[in-house]
Image (cartoon, rainbow, N blue to C red):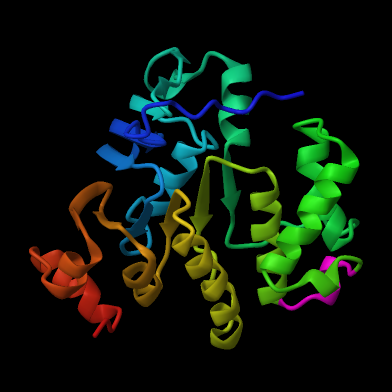
Amino acid sequence: MMNKLTTPSDTTTPVIQINGLHKSYGQLDVLKGVSMTAPRGHVISLIGSSGSGKSTLLRCCNLLENSQAGDILFDGEAVRWKGQGLDRTPSDRAQVTRFRTNLSMVFQQFNLWAHMTILQNVMEAPLTVLGEDRPKVEARARALLDKVGIGDKCDAWPAQLSGGQQQRAAIARALCMQPTALLFDEPTSALDPELQQEVVKVIKDLASEHRTMILVTHDMRLAADVSDHVVFLHQGVICEEGPPSQLFGNPQTDRLRQFLSATMVN
């Protein structure tokens, strides 16, 4: 059975801490020394124009992308690396797997397995990765599908669900791993406005439970409503950050003011 991370007795230890992270694709520098902290029970939103590095930063958090310099810590434990620069990779695959089981990611495209029912989709990772007992996992999966409002879709196939229902199933699948933190990469941008609101409600409900979440979004209203802290990225650096009341109510930089004006935040 895969071991889960042990929550430190010191609850002030951040779930995720990033120090001086650099990420390049060949000669293209995407992240240029980014530092960020996700305290336990807080929602951090990453905002910025397309190409600013938001999704890359999120994928580096989950070790889906390798960074070239800087430190990444989960619950105070640093990722161990080997190699330098573009050759840098994690040196401990078991550590990577352990971290990923505790950082469930919800993608823009729902990534449900088409050959499995919705219930099977939600149950699959705890069964195969964590090695949990099927009756226990099934009970949890059914409860989570009820929680996100699609408990009646357990036996449906992904193709039979709307986009909003599929994304809610993807959130239930992420929750079924009982992660330390949830990572959302543009969870509503593939949906039309009416379906977006189904998913927004679920995210707001999760935020109200004080779950640790990092949210990449173009939905400024969602970021303002659910975040404890907002990070504005521009050209691979943090241009401005702070509580949502400050960033949306009193932006300090011209670049953020321009961005908010373009995204029509009132």
The correct choice, above or below, for 68 with respect to 133 in the image is above
Image quarter of the N terminus: top right
Query: How far across and how far down the image is residue 148, in percent?
Result: 67, 68
What range of the chain is rendered magenta? 156-162
- 83 left or right of 259? right
Residue at point 20%, 72% (across, down): 248
Query: How far across and how far down the image is residue 23, in percent?
Result: 36, 35
- 178 left or right of 11? right
**To which quarter of the image does residue 152 belong?**
bottom right
Query: How far across and how far down the image is residue 89, in percent?
Result: 50, 20
Question: In the rendered structure, does residue 31 fall within the stretch colored magenta?
Answer: no
Q: Nearer the viewer, residue 242 or 206?
A: 206
Q: Nearer the viewer, residue 40 or 53?
A: 40
The correct choice, above or below, for 161 with respect to 184 in the image is below
The correct choice, above or below, for 184 with respect to 219 in the image is above
Query: How far across and how far down the image is residue 220, in percent?
Result: 34, 73
Question: In the rendered structure, does residue 160 fall within the stretch colored magenta?
Answer: yes
Image quarter of the C terminus: bottom left
Residue at point 18%, 66% (across, down): 247
Q: How many marks?
A: 0
- 154 left or right of 13? right
**To which quarter of the image does residue 115 belong?**
bottom right
Residue at point 58%, 73% (across, down): 199
Residue at point 41%, 30% (across, down): 67
Q: Nearer the viewer, residue 133 or 231?
A: 133
